[in-house]
Image (cartoon, rainbow, N blue to C red):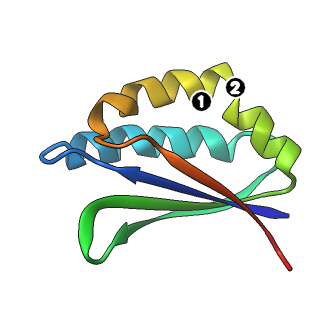
Amino acid sequence: MIRVLIERHIAETLETAYEERSRAILQNAVAAPGFISGETLVNAHDPNHRITLANWRSEADWDRWYHSTERQQLLNDVKPMMDLDEKITILHQC
């Protein structure tokens, strides 16, 4: 199993619109082969900094979802709301 840490920073006043669209991304990821679970957190000191921690069966499963047309189309709805590029970190257990 791997964990994927996804960090996004949302532009001021776009939080509600972002929440709606980001839920759609997570809902579609849940149906992707290899997805185990995920949660989204808000930085306690910066409410526009969102962190998603997702568990995937393998890095190959994550890569398939990451490069999928479906994810790219969903992300295109979210990108204009972000004031920084999405940052992704792949984590393996020790």
Q: How many marks?
A: 2
On-image quarter of the C terminus: bottom right
Q: Which residue is at the front of the view, 22 or 67?
A: 67
Vertical comparison of 51 with 10: above or below: below
Q: In this picture, is 81 found above or below 74?
A: below
**Which residue has dot 2 on it?**
68
Image: 44 above or below 88: below
Three-letter residue code for mark 2: Ser
- In the drawing, does residue 55 fall left or right of residue 28? right
According to the picture, the residue beneath numbered tag 1 turns out to be 71
Q: Secondary structure at mark 2?
A: loop
Q: Residue at point 68% right, 36% down?
A: 66
Q: Amino acid at mark 1?
A: Arg
| Residue 82 picture location, percent across and down | 32, 40
Circle number at residue 86: none
Left or right of 85, for residue 1: right
Look at the numbered disc 1 and give the secondary structure of its residue: helix
Residue 43 in the image: state x and y as whole percent: 34, 71
> Do the CB atoms of the residues marked 1 and 2 lie less than 8 Å apart?
yes
Mark 1: few, some, or many residues within 10 Å (few <14, many ≥20)?
Answer: some
